């Protein structure tokens, strides 16, 4: 029986572990990163940074995620990270990473950033999209934006593996691009008219207390938000355009769903060749993702439930074709905090450390 | 302060109440009908029919919904319904109503049917859509299908008021048609390319035990189902085509959401006139629904949450326009068991009894 | 068919409505009060006070609870309340009411307070229990504490009806005292050894954003809190002691349950007379509550679910006896925001206005 | 960083894996067993038995839990299990295991039974408790009942390791006994007057569809059930009495909580020595469980949430003392399907295979 968390068999003491600092430890991105690295055979958590939790002992903060030797959470110090760590995962509010990354890089720390700060190649694109943050954080790191690699692991492995700075995709772009890119790359769907109707659990809103994310408010309810204006629209379009080789425009609408974790993206497009069947389209996906243990392409007629991928770094993809309307419908389920955030970060960390992408990552959940 | 449940002021003894039989009393459609009629100033529950609950006393079956005089549930008998009742609400599995309705009508009972049996004008259309049911229930009531009125209350009031048999729309068609029909009627959106991405709570699956509807299975998960093949597609298209005056084709995808009640429909279309603004489109809706207390058109930029309409017979509509893509996005939230089922049934009952549509119906929920 | 929300039949214009100010309008206590009074035949909402929501129009704040004439929320002003209102419902953080009540009373406003400020007869008892609040709010209103009536509606109706200031019980005391008091009054259970294991939905934590009440944190989890130290312990003991006529000590442990509304109290005691059966004990409850439409005593062997009382001002009580151990087990389910808070407030308001207790209050929920 | 799922370091090919048959594969007990063994370094799944799923391929039944080589589910055959397997885990309705176990043992299969069939030393005790099952399944295996080992792993390791047949405790007994036994063993709490108020998620009701376990019915609600009569009472008492060395009587009341997984037991007892502090009592627990990685004793004042143990084989224990009332309050949180069922089964399997108890078991969950 293959133990998916033991994909590598060398004992730790034969090969020194890579040391990873977690900046923003007690938010959901930080918590997931710590959880994944705690069990990872080739990385060890070397340094924790937190704002509100600074100077506190970790194990009393998080009795549900005890760490050996009960480390103390620190205030940010690039020097101390440089001394203690090889890598840093930054899980911070948008804008803030851009103030820390240059110094970390200058001290030879390789950085994985979970925010949107380095997702756009052009800094002006970021400034137009993250207007409020751009006002608070005056950025001049135009070159870094160009240098940073967009960390959609399955699509960029060799570039990621050599990068100093990897920017992890947003949760919605991850779920939406994975099923869509193969069709755009091969020119099988029309460029315009793409509609992405996405649904996310509330943990996507982060761990900071907000009235709208209270159990009492978000339970027993679904609602759209960020209609026409959501910032992941431009991130999706940038990547889709790059892969398609021509301008792609999408209509993206997220919805808030009463569940903790999970993100489902339902993508509607129009097939260029109306003769393509669902099985044909499934083959397109299967061909691209066959060797990726992080992606499962479901049989035609089986549709993914987010429960199936909860607590895993996996995406379940499914495709259906409506010959009556000429439409292709792509469905993609991920765990927004893992494959959509910290799990993809560790997947990229694996690439940067020349390990198989899926090393140490959970690929099977607990059902129900 | 207006008491919304007291829209009529005559005491009961001044005007004899209409007597209503509920057939299929202990399913969700039956339970909601009973709940609504229990508090209704002009109707009284005169007869309860149930299969599994036959011969049992109501109050021990449903301690949460006590009825005065604790009636006994009966096996179906058209004669007894004829003796006791003026109206019958049928809440039965698809196909079964078609076996009971002719006899009830022949005894001068006016019928409201919650199933799909009389939603199609052409019986063959029903047979093509409800294939399995058509095999089990051999139907010859072609004339009745033509006679039956589609009970989308706000769109058909005068016809409903005179009908012997009213067929209540499905929950998805109700939510989807309400915001869409005004635009189709005025020819403001293109005929093809309509996409309806809908999300429903689990009570839509009924009260009969199914593994997929267990809390353990459906909690903490969202998934699409019935992709390309869902039967409400043709029901929506029939009504949309009728109102538009030309063939309308929709791509309809329902999703199961971990909540009890609530249905959200997100409808994507393309504006014929790309110059129309969201405010313009809001005016279109407002103009049609201004005098309907059962419909609220939200301000542009406010998007409906299903929690807002829970336990009410109300639809909250919102419209947004993306000038970048030329798309219109319609959003509609209802309670699937009330406005999407039994509430609309009572609304139609009001019409049939020449009462204001909203008489006795809850229009304000309890938040949160 | 009795319409429970129409228990009184006089039209509004025959009898001038009592005018009620709501202080703390946009919290959950305020929202529920507004919701209940909006549909009440004898009260009207005359004035809204809010801190964060001051100067805003109500209907845009709460599209799910529209008010006629769309009132503006005001900053607190005793003078304006005196001009506009006969009663005031205060739904404020503990301690704050004690600063406002004296002035309101001096202007002849009759007050219903939802906080704990006037629940203790002795001000020192309050100070010992609400230590932090006692430090922030220096209180000298010893007399008012003695004057205030504890508003457990079914147990204090005549005193409540004559009071200037009624202090509404906490949600846990309400649910726990209702089944327990009849047995204490008749001396049927032992004075010591009472254990109250209570379970509440998250709305009991209020509408202010707290990390622990986020959907992501409180969903899919149950946990005890305030073990041995919860402040409702002394409130329960004060009332229990008063009714029993001797010192009663309870062990009270609340638990947080992943649901929005609902509170279940499971009370364990020891019968003095081990020969009493469950039916005997049910008769004790039935005798006390027979004429109270707000209380339902369930048959022996039927246990209450909080879903049955959601959105109602009702308590469902059940009793069981274990002859093997000599124990009595009392179970009580309420909606914490209605019967446990704003509904009981309106029940008291009814008493103060010489109306039947249950006037205008919802007594049947929507299931499921 | 210690990888908790790699507690043993020998590669699989150095040591032949033990082969385990799962009987009752597609229920929740079966699913969890398969999930745990799939990743286990020393066991492999050798045979699947199912009733409704017989003859189906596993991976299409459970796309969320793919197995290598996609095995077919079989009808029960002791011969085939004997050929293919060393151990069998039985996850079947009560009564049924007693018909299969004797044959399996006779073929030298060592058995772990998840049902209640072998939890009682005296077969008559079982017959009195499982009356309906005793009528359906005529049992004569008196000797086997005496032989079977009660599989509370931490309390019975050496006996379990040598057993042919291990009976896994119920979920409620597991959670309740773990914190209680140390105090009973040392005679620190009084023998009578113990109250266990327990709360479980809905997955405890199994995967078979039941109306009461539908999302629509059990969501947004908590209710007691099995009051005074629940069958786990006698199971708890048997073990408690055995460890205490004198008759122990408990009052046990379970409640159904709207969550999938998780079980919290709140136990109330009276201290013999009222001078004992919470810290003293914590030391009692800590001393017993210090070397058990499956048990965490929380600091005084930290109370366990079931979310902390979800998807793990861990119990979080906490103790509080109320010096005012002389009471001790024990709190215990487990995942009912893992530590309360299949995880404890694998823990016992580890013991039977002379592995460290926690081998291959998840001890850290994913939060939130």
Image (cartoon, coloured by chain):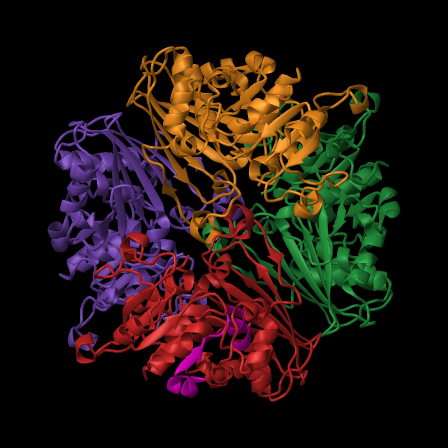
Chain colours: A purple, B orange, C green, D red
Of C20 and C189, the residue lying toward us: C189
Name the residue located 64 percent from the left edge and 53 percent from the top edge.
C263
Of B137 and D343, the residue lying toward us: B137
Residue B280 visible to an observer of this rendering? no
Relative image position of residue D348 (x, y in whole percent):
39, 78
Relative image position of residue D191 (x, y in whole percent):
66, 82
Q: Quadrant of residue C253?
A: bottom right
Relative image position of residue A108 (x, y in whole percent):
17, 59
Q: Is C331 drawn above or below residue C275 in the view shown? A: above
Q: Quadrant of residue A133?
A: top left
Q: Is residue C159 magenta?
A: no
Magenta extent: D156-178
Q: Main secondary structure of the magenta part?
A: helix
Is A279 placed left or right of C197 in the picture? left
Relative image position of residue D363 (x, y in whole percent):
38, 70
Of D345 and C57, the residue lying toward us: D345
Count of numbered marks: 0
Residue C176 visible to an observer of this rendering? yes
Is B71 placed left or right of A17 in the picture? right
Q: Is D159 drawn above or below residue C189 in the view shown? A: below
Q: Is residue D162 magenta?
A: yes
Is D35 placed left or right of D124 in the picture? left
Is A214 placed left or right of C150 in the picture? left
Of B63 and B244, the residue lying toward us: B63
Q: Which of the image's four quarters has the N terminus of chain A?
A: bottom left
Q: Is D258 drawn above or below residue A258 in the view shown? A: below
Q: Which of the image's four quarters has the C terminus of chain A?
A: bottom left
Name the residue located 51 percent from the left edge and 83 percent from the top edge.
D142
């Amino acid at each position: 029986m293959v133990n998916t968390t033991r994909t590598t068999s060398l004992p730790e003491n034969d090969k020194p572990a890579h040391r990873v600092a977690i900046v923003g430890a007690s938010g959901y991105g930080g918590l997931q990163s710590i959880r994944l690295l705690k069990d990872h055979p080739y990385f060890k958590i070397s340094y924790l940074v937190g704002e509100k939790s600074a100077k506190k002992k970790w194990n009393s903060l998080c009795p549900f995620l005890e760490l050996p030797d009960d480390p103390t959470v620190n205030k940010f110090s690039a020097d101390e990270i440089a001394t203690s760590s090889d890598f840093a995962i930054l899980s911070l509010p948008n804008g803030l990473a851009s103030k820390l990354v240059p110094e970390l890089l200058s001290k030879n720390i390789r950085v994985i950033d979970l925010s949107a700060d380095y997702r756009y190649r052009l800094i002006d694109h970021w400034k137009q999209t993250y207007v409020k943050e751009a006002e608070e954080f005056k950025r001049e790191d135009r070159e870094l934006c160009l240098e940073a690699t967009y960390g959609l692991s399955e699509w960029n492995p060799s570039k990621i593996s050599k990068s100093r700075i990897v920017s992890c995709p947003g949760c919605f772009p991850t779920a939406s691009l994975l099923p869509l890119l193969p069709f755009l790359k091969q020119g099988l769907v029309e460029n315009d008219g793409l509609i992405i109707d996405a649904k996310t659990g509330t943990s996507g809103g982060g761990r900071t207390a907000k009235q709208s994310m209270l159990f009492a408010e978000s339970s027993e309810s679904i609602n759209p938000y960020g209609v026409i204006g959501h910032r992941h629209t431009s991130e999706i379009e940038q990547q889709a355009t790059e892969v398609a080789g021509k301008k792609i425009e999408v209509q993206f609408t997220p919805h808030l769903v009463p569940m903790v974790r999970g993100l489902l993206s339902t993508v509607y497009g129009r097939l260029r060749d109306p003769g393509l069947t669902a099985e044909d389209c499934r083959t397109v996906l299967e061909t691209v993702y066959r060797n990726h243990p992080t992606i499962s392409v479901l049989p035609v007629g089986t549709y993914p439930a987010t429960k199936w991928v909860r607590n895993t770094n996996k995406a379940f993809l499914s495709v259906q074709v409506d010959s009556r309307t000429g439409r292709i419908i792509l469905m993609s389920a991920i765990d927004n905090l893992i494959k959509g955030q910290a799990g993809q970060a560790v997947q990229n960390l694996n690439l940067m450390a020349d390990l198989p992408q899926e090393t140490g990552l959970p690929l099977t959940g607990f059902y129900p």
